[in-house]
Amino acid sequence: MAQNLPDNTDIVTGVRILRPAHGGTCFAHANDKPIFVSGAIPGEVVDVRIDSRRSRVSYGTAVNIVEPSQHRQPHIWPEGEKLGVGGADLGHVTPAYQRQWKSDVIKDQLSRVGGADTLEHVLETVGESALTVAPATGDETGSLLNRRTRVDFEVSPNGRLAMKREASNELVEIETMPLADESILELGLLGDSAWRKFFKPGKRVRAIAPNAGGRRVLIGNQTFNASQHRVEDQATWEVEAAGYKAKFEVHTAGFWQAHRSAPQDLVELVLAAARVQPGQSVIELYSGAGLLTKFLAHQLGSEGAIISVEGSRQAVADARRNMEGTHAERDIRSGRIDGRQVLRAWSDLGERPDVIVLDPPRSGAGRDVVKAIGAVQPKRVVLVSCDPAAGARDIKELRQVGYSLETFHPIDLFPQTHHLETVAVLSRKSASKSFIPVSISPKDMGLSEEKEQPTYANIRDYVQKTHGMKVSSLYVAQMKAECGLETQADRSGDKKQPKCPPEKREAILDAFRHFGLIGEDGTEE
């Protein structure tokens, strides 16, 4: 590849590319100084246009490939490459080597961000082969085009759809989008489109191709169907995994995995990692519209319990609707996810959860949340990461609060880009000098402490032995709140929160009387 450049362009010639870097660039040295190069492949010799400098580090773009790699291919999106649009930063790399590239980045970030000890721990527990990035279902062969069921644009001053240049706010109009599902392209949104009558400069436009409902186009805050008629702000999806098919309604402005196979692949990986059994309890953090929540609840069954926490109110509203028909006790919460939120969920659950599942944003879970998880001490933690640097940091910090890596599964849900997902399972290990013991009670966080006698387990055991039925901790918590024995988090907005059935209500009240929590008249002792 060669480009015609103005005479005053700053060019460095003959740069040997050393390794892939996190973020879709490659690392090299030019004039004994570090440089990150876009559009290159490790092992190549390229000429680089310097785009910017920060301190001693330069950032540039390969403009002439002197010695091409065997893994180079014609860019899958020539228009995007020419215009410098983000979204296909690995489009010049063959699909198989894209996954190798991502594996190398995972290993690099485990070492650089997690530290040499973290990388050593990962290699000792799961082996280097576990760092191999797997293709998404259906991506084992082929060009990996037309995989995205959701694409976002902005409207240019000329009233056409556009995207931003990489690392810039500059909009450039586009005529093609090979990453989008074919049914999105068939809408005819690009170029001089019949949709332009709806486009206003500066508006955001989202095209969606759900697998269980009609296509949707979100323009600003208005949703249209493929016939350009206004419709409800919902897209319908179906996911089948682990022998169970579920339907989801998600707001058109909300989050849903973009790759056509991503929902199924992620659910199957998380279910295999969590290994939940009927009657167990789960806390889920960053739960979105309920994709993982619904499948976890299905496996927990009517005697199980799950508390999920999500920061987006709209996503929580979607999740509450999507959870209809599940039988597990569930508490779908909206709120900022921090250490207090984790400990509050534990306090309201009334027992130590068997599993905590978390799927944080690209910034990761962070130390505060991880410290709280260490205090809760679930048997297993299932960590879903969409950023290898944040994932490495979270694994490092989970190890510091007493967890050891058990399994590690990276998967490429973002072909043609540097992004990927990893699903890691960490389980508790014996106390040793290699981790920092954490002892935080709900009282330390300003919450009510668990009662020493009777415990939730005592109450559940009494009900099962005396009345021959199982009750969940959430039902016990409901009845404690009803009797004024303790308060629960506000769930007034959850109209679908299941209520304790009459026969279980009477059995729990009998247990309260047995343990002296209430008198015969039902009032607190």
Image (spheres, rainbow, N blue to C red):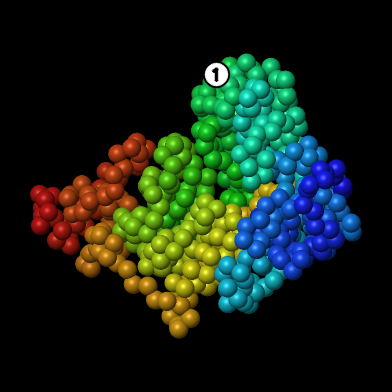
Q: Nearer the viewer, residue 440 or 406?
A: 440
Residue depicted at 42% across the width and 76% down the height: 436
| Residue matched to label 1 | 230
Q: Is residue 338 above or below residue 222?
A: below
Q: Which residue appears farthest toward the front when viewing the image?
A: 8
Q: Quadrant of residue 53?
A: bottom right
Q: Which element type, helix, strand or loop, lies under badge 1?
A: loop
The type of residue carrying mark 1 is Arg
The reply to whether residue 92 is visible in this rendering is no
Residue depicted at 72% across the width and 20% down the height: 192
User: Is residue 191 left or right of 122 when viewed as pictured?
Assistant: right
Residue depicted at 52% across the width and 37% down the height: 254
Image coords of residue 501 (percent x, y) = 30, 44
The C terminus is located in which quarter? bottom left
The reply to whether residue 86 is visible in this rendering is yes
Q: Nearer the viewer, residue 474 or 66?
A: 66
| Mark 1 neighbour density, 10 Å: few (under 14) some (14–19) many (20 or more) | some
Q: Is residue 300 above or below residue 229?
A: below
Q: Nearer the viewer, residue 502 or 273?
A: 273
Image coords of residue 522 (percent x, y) = 13, 50
User: Is residue 245 left or right of 88 when viewed as pictured?
Assistant: left
Residue depicted at 21% across the width and 67% down the height: 453
Image coords of residue 208 (percent x, y) = 62, 32
